[in-house]
Image (spheres, grey):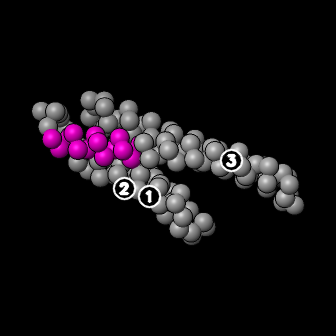
Amino acid sequence: MNRRNKVARALATLGSGVLFLSACLHCMAYTKISPGLSASNLAAPLQAVSRVAFLAMAWDWIVLGSIVMLAIFAETRLRKAFVLICGIAVLVETGLTLPFVGLFIGNELIGTAGLLIFCGGLLLQRSDT
């Protein structure tokens, strides 16, 4: 394997690791906010939506990180496209949530993961020769 692909794999793997870490943190935060939501005066449907949103975002990051990990270590023609699409998806998600939740460690982690994955995808070459 050439040096460029090693760096690409390292960047994308690190980005996936950040996504997995973010998903774990989101699941841990879910256990903290769930009792608070139950005690709030928020309507029951909105409580349910808030819970689902927390878990759905964590699931989204787990799926995207897994796709990147599979694509980065598979020797397929489309691996570069898969990694780039996943990196762009995470960056778009970061950009879309930024106006709603503002700058905080969660958005910074996701943005960093997206950049790492995208840069890893850009560096991937067609073959490992």
Specify the segment rendered in magenta: 3-16
Q: Are marks 1 and 3 in contact (CB under 8 Å)?
A: no
Image-based side of 41 in relation to 26, left or right: right
Q: Nearer the viewer, residue 30 or 73?
A: 30
Number of the front mark, 1 or 3: 3
| Residue 121 is inside the magenta segment | no
User: Relative to residue 69, is residue 91 depicted above or below?
Assistant: below
Quadrant of residue 78 in the image?
A: top left
Question: For this rendering, which residue is in front, 92 or 16?
Answer: 16
Q: Mark 2, mark 3: which one is toward the viewer?
A: 3
Q: Residue at x 36, y 48 (%)?
A: 117
Q: Is residue 59 left or right of residue 2?
A: right
Determine if residue 127 is in view.
yes
For label 3, the SS is: helix
Q: Position of residue 73 (x, y in %)?
A: 31, 31
Position of 6 relative to 38 (above/below): above
Q: Residue at x 47, y 54 (%)?
A: 110
Residue found 84% across the figure and 58% down from its top = 40
Q: CA distance from mark 2 to mark 3?
A: 26 Å
Amino acid type, callout 3: Tyr
Q: Position of residue 75 (x, y in %)?
A: 26, 29
| Residue to which mark 3 is pinned | 30
Quadrant for the C terminus, please.
top left
Q: Residues within 10 Å of mark 1 (few under 14, many from 20)?
A: many
Disc 2 target residue: 115
- Left or right side of 71 for 62: right
**Mark 1 lies on residue:** 111
For the point 87% across and 61% down, the residue is: 41
> Are circles 2 and 1 on residues that touch, CB within 8 Å?
yes
Kindly report the secondary structure that dominates the magenta region of the rendered protein.
Answer: helix
Which percent across, then down, holds residue 121?
A: 29, 47
